[in-house]
Structures are given as C-alpha cells and as structure tokens.
Image (cartoon, rainbow, N blue to C red):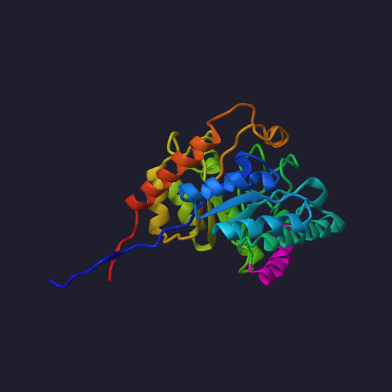
Amino acid sequence: MPSATESTQRSPIGFNVLAWSASISEKMHPITERLKTIGYDGIECFIDNQDVSVYRQFGDHLNQLGLRSTTVMVIGPDENPVSESPQVREKAVTYLKGAIDRAHAMGATVIAGPMHSAFATFSRREPQADEYARSAEVLHAAGEYARQANIVLTPEALNRFECYLCNTMEQLAHLIRLTDHPNVRAMFDTHHANMEEKRFPEAIRTIAPVLAHVHISANDRGTPGADHIPWDETFRTLAEVNYTGWMTIEAFTRNDVDFANSIGVWREYNDPWHIAENGLTFIKTMQEKYAKKELV
C-alpha cells in the first residue's frame, strides 16, 4: 500500500481585546505579547475615533510580534444606514470609510460588527424592505472603498435586544445578496445565534456561501466551552461547509467600565486570561476533532 500523509487547513484563531479595553494604546502591548506567547494567530480590536496614527503604531507593534489583526465596530443613530434621510446615510458612508482607513493603517483584513444599522436603535416595527435596500446601498458604497484597502466588511446579525434589522442568518444573507459586493460578506456569532436561531447547523449552512468571519462566543460571554452553546454541531458544520476564515473569541468583562455599561455587561463572567487560555485550548481541540483530513 502506498504511503500517505494527512493534511489539514486550520482556521486562524484570534482574540478580541475588548475583554480588556475598547481603546488601543501602548498599555495593550503586554497583553498582545502574552496572547502571541500562548499561541494566538491574531488579535481583534474595536475601532473608535482615535487618530489613524494610533492604529498605524499599534499595527507596527503587532507586525513586530508576528500577529495578524481583525477589527470590530458599531455605528450610531447619527449615521444610521437605514435612515430615511439621505444626509444621515451619507454620514454612514463617511463613518464606514473612516473605520476602513483606521483598519487599513493597522494592517487589519476584516471589519466585523453590526454596521448594517445603528446599534440598539429601534423603529418599533419589523424591518422593512426599503430599510434593507438603504442599508445595502450604504454597504455597497463602503465595500467599494474597502476594496481599495483589501479589507472585507462582515456585517453581523445581533440579538433582538440590540438590533431589529438582522437577527438571523436568513435576514443577514438577504442583506448581503442585496448589497452584491465581493468585499461585503457576513459573520456568524455563536452568542447571538444562541438566542435567535432554531438550529446552528441550518443557520451556518444558510450563511455559508457568504461567510467570512466567525465569533466564538459563550452564551454568557465568558469562556467558550464552559457553557451550553452546541459546540460540536458548530465546529462540525463549519468543517462541512469548508470554512477556513478566522475563529475569534469575543468575550466581555467590566475591565473597561464605560464600554461594559454601553453594552449591558453588569457582572464578571470569567477572568480575561481564563477565557484566553482555556478558550484557545478549546478551539484547537475542536478544530482537531472536526478537521477535514485529505490523503496527499
């Protein structure tokens, strides 16, 4: 019998430093250095309104460590992409372009988050067809700008208490189809899916054709694997659809009090390093368990 070896392609693993702070600075350097030491491929950070130079300097630091990066963002009511006002929607495009500039300066390749509509801003009615159309128009314009920076925008479906336009993968897939731009794909977050999806496998298969980013998040935003998310179904289905993009842990604490208050985090779930160390081990174990092995 001829000899053969098994080869696998592993999704890169990232950690969102929002567990420590929503703002990047030199104070984050020891944290990113330790994340590199324990085995992460990259980090994810929040994009705020700091000067582009701050992101460039932080990106230089990550590059020296050999860490890659992705980013997350939210958008507020003054720049709401679904607004009836053309002026507000233009502000949305401008705001997204600013986020792209900051991510590009840092060397990031992905911007994730609920950029399809304003965070925690509700119309008190179900999402309307014209709202999807307006959001798609804004995202398409932002996608054109992102193409120049080689960045992929990955809008995120949130739970019903934080968003109304996109709660499910079915709704998000509809929006991405309307947007019709190669630099606007989709993301899947296990925390939100835990509240909104009937079954994880069906949800993942629904979004698979446009899936470009995944948040590995516990149901309580603590340590993945020490919770009740259907992890075996999740990792098995991601392997079945040949997903090879980032698997990034997004967990929250009260370390950054202002940020925690803004998203309703009122208690500690796990220590950040418990999340980072045990979460990394958990993801690697699950990736190995469901790795697609091919004889070459």
- Residue 5: x and y in percent read 25, 66
Task: Confirm whether residue 215 shows in the render.
Answer: no
- Residue 100: x and y in percent read 71, 61
Seen in the image, is 285 located left or right of residue 62? left
Q: Residue at left 59%, top 61%?
A: 185
How many labels were placed on the picture? 0
Q: Residue furthest right?
A: 87
Task: Confirm whether residue 74 shows in the render.
Answer: yes
Q: Residue at left 63%, top 67%?
A: 183
Say which quarter of the image contains residue 295. bottom left
Seen in the image, is 247 located left or right of residue 32? left
Q: Residue at left 43%, top 34%?
A: 226
Q: Examine the structure image and report whether residue 159 is included in the region drawn in magenta.
A: no
Q: Quadrant of the C terminus?
A: bottom left
Seen in the image, is 90 located left or right of residue 167? right
Which stretch is magenta?
A: 135-150
| Image: 224 above or below 206 | above
Q: Quadrant of the N terminus?
A: bottom left
Q: Examine the structure image and report whether residue 137 is included in the region drawn in magenta.
A: yes
Say which quarter of the image contains residue 70. bottom right
Q: Residue furthest left?
A: 1
- Residue 163: x and y in percent read 67, 43
Our reading of the magenta stretch's main secondary structure is helix
Give 206 or 289, whichever is nearer the viewer: 289
Q: Residue at left 63%, top 60%?
A: 108
- Residue 140: x and y in percent read 70, 65
